[in-house]
Image (cartoon, rainbow, N blue to C red):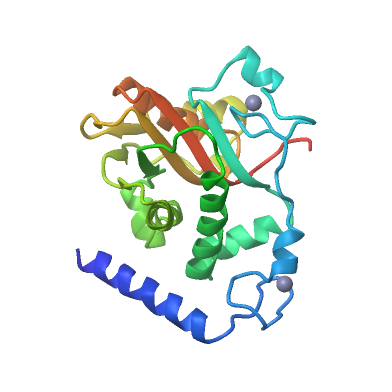
Amino acid sequence: MARNIVAVLTHHFVELYSKLLPIPCFLCGDFSQHDALCKSCCADLPWLTQCCQRCALPLPVDGICGSCLNQPPPQRQTFALFRYESPVNHCIAAFKFQQQLVFTRLFASLLASRQRQRQEPLPQLLIPIPLHPTRLRQRGYNQSAQLADALSRLLTIPVNKTSLIRQRNTQPQSGLRGRQRQHNLKQAFALHKPLPYSHVALIDDVYTTGHTVAEASRCLQQSGVEQVEVWTIARAIRHY
Ligand SMILES: [Zn+2]
Ligand SMILES: [Zn+2]
């Protein structure tokens, strides 16, 4: 509870501070704006436009990629703002480790405006991909949970950060290859109790191989959530 109050106060303080005083753009250092990035650097980011609806793989036109046609992932849709390449990878590193609050605000407002444009109904609940308690203690906070909180405020969709838990402290996916990655995440997630929602969005910072969100989606579906979608900042692309 005390931690929540501190997080809310810190959020309001940074909001106020950044409205009063300009912040240097993280990429070009321009002091003339109040966001993590200036308008021109933001416009130059590798925006993901046409892509696979199921896994956000870039495609020449919107549709479903061959891999999702062959083996559909459990999530119905994946939204990603960017391709995970320079300079978005540096911005996400800053979001994780140094300038969390200003980047949380930027990424959340960009994701929220993308979601406001959609035709189909918004999900009823947001769930950030959880960290294992040991990892959470080491890092001190979960950046996906911060993003989910900000999205929840902007879109007035409730957020649930307690029901989905990481029951195994899996190895970091980055140190593993193909099948090892998939095996590493088996039974990684569990749900405390069934959720009274049929449509949920999972929030994660980067979609790498998709194994993490697929495993979390399966866990939600096995507990009765009919429709799971994934919202992420960036989509990593192998051999791109
Ligand atoms: Zn700039
Ligand atoms: Zn796909």
Q: Is residue 45 above or below residue 130?
A: below
Q: Residue at x 59, y 60 (%)?
A: 93
Residue 197 appears in the picture as rendered: yes
Count the numbered circles shown: 0
Position of 3 compared to 200: left or right? left
- Residue 184: give x, y in percent of width and height: 47, 31
Q: Residue furthest bottom?
A: 21
> On the rendered structure, is 165 left or right of 93?
left
Q: Is residue 157 left or right of residue 144?
A: left
Q: Is residue 189 above or below residue 80?
A: above
Establish if 108 lies above or below 228. below
Q: Residue at x 42, y 58 (%)?
A: 150
In the depicted structure, whether residue 19 falls above or below residue 197? below
Q: Which residue is at the front of the view, 110 or 222?
A: 110
Residue at coordinates 64% horizontally, 13% vertically from top-left?
Answer: 70
Task: Provide residue 238's location: percent of width, then percent of height.
Answer: 72, 36
Residue 185 visible at all: no
Quadrant in which the N terminus appears: bottom left
Q: Position of residue 64 (x, y in %)?
A: 66, 22
Residue at figure coordinates x 36%, y 27% from the top left: 219
Rendering coords of residue 43 (x, y %): 73, 60
Quarter containing ligand 2? top right
The C terminus lies in which quarter of the figure?
top right
